[in-house]
Amino acid sequence: MPEEKTPQVNNTSIQSSIQSQGVATAASASQAPQDVTAAVNSEQKPNPQNPFLIDIPAIPTQEGPMGIRFDFNDGARVLLPKGKWHVQIEDDETDNIIFACDADEGWVLSTKKYYIPFRIRVWERGKKTPVLNHTLSLKGKEVQLKFPVGTLGDTIGWMTYANRFQEKHQCVAEVAMAHNMAEIFEAQYPNLFFTHLPGKPRFEKPYASYMLGLFFRGNTTNQPIDFRKVGLHRTAGFILGVDPREEAPRVKLGSPRKIKERYVCIATKASSQAKMWNNGFGWEQVVHYLKELGYRVLCIDKDAVTGSNFTWNRMPHEAEDFTGARPLQERIELLEHADFFIGLGSGLSWLAWCTHVPVILISGFSLPICEFYTPYRVFNSHGCNGCWDDIHCNFDHYDYFWCPKFKGTDRQFECTRLITGKQVIGHIKQLMKDHHLTAPKNKKQENK
């Protein structure tokens, strides 16, 4: 995230007697310190400017007495003019003083960037009554909820929590997300203002803003609990301080059926090899089984072929090619009329979840708690598994073949290689039984 440009502040000192529990910082420099808030591996060289990141205002947006400025953009922020000040940042819910310091001028910033009901108090040093005594109150205020990625699954997973946040606080909420995602949600959430990214934000001087994301390497600055402990989607509930129980977000349903025959949708691709089903026979066996049942099998991946270097993943031979960079609403209309969907721990599985179609989800690099609940979650415990959710393993976004424990050995990607076609077919049989689905081939015979 680029540095914020701020007005120059006179050169002063902040007294060395700073009392802190490690959750705020004070600085007299001319620029506000910035934490890394993008969901990237901070040990690697940064990517070019992220088009989905919205910078916070250069100076706090709220005017306090005596030239003091403050707001709650990226945590609690206080900018002090020249003077003799004592500052406290408190948690109003608990009455804990989480930071206190004396300062002559400059910035006081909370280290924690997720939702906390902050209270900011500033005194003229030596006086008993604070000149600023402000408790966070979001009702009716302009608040930005920022989705700093363009990925499908993450955005779908977090959407419900953004809506809950607005309903809880009755704020004027701007939700900034990738254009194609905003398109499928905007009409379903009239209580929210959607900003389509890349683009200019609606609010230039928000009272508060919160960044949703997956923050890696044990980061507890931008999230109260490591996302690997609570799940990819539920982490947004903890960041925003709302009920973390999962609920599929709303999308437009009720489109007319366009394919007469009964069909199943599949998605076989993901953003890295660890997320793929790395059993060389699995997809072919499953698609062949579905075809024998009389189903049309539609592959709805964005790409028919994807991979890197020496490894390329292709669409199963017997599947019908419905791949391509198609509008998400078109995918929704296709999914809602499928008998069921089979996919990986990737974006199209989350999109299928929104349509309420039964989902068979195949994953071994993540644990079942990572994704939304489905009774047809395919997981094999007979080998290494769950590295994505292991707090001792740090995902490398730059390594397409990331396998933290067994890369370069015969055991690489065994988490999904040990998931067999038979295992997935077993889940298909159970799903069809649970939903009283008769195989199309048998149904035709009954109708004769």
Image (cartoon, rainbow, N blue to C red):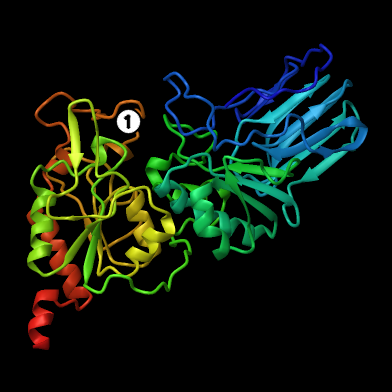
Give whichever of 196, 356 is nearer the camera: 196
Give the residue drawn at x 47%, y 64%. 251
Determine the residue positioned at 29% across, 44% down.
303
The image quarter containing residue 101 is top right
The answer to whether residue 439 shows anywhere in this view is no
Q: Quadrant of residue 438?
A: bottom left
Work out whether 9 lies above or below 128: above
Q: Is residue 320 visible?
A: yes
**Is residue 348 shown left or right of residue 65?**
left
In this rendering, the answer to whether 398 lies above or below 274 is above
Q: Residue furthest bottom?
A: 448
Q: Nearer the viewer, residue 238 or 294?
A: 294
Quarter containing the C terminus: bottom left
Residues packed near mark 1 inside 10 Å, few (<14), some (14 to 19) or many (20 plus): few
Specify the amino acid type for callout 1: His
**Left or right relative to 143: residue 122:** right
- Estimate the x, y position of residue 201 in percent, counting from the top left: 67, 43
Task: Indicate the position of residue 382 as horizontal and vertical percent values.
Answer: 11, 44
- Residue under the point 16% across and 41% down: 278
Q: In this rendering, would 400 be left or right of 281?
A: right
Residue picked out by circle 1: 392
Task: Give coordinates of residue 122: x percent, y percent.
Answer: 83, 33
Position of the N terminus, as image quadrant, is top right
Q: Secondary structure at mark 1?
A: loop
Q: Position of residue 288 (x, y in %)?
A: 8, 58
Which residue shows up at 14% across the image and 75% down it? 440
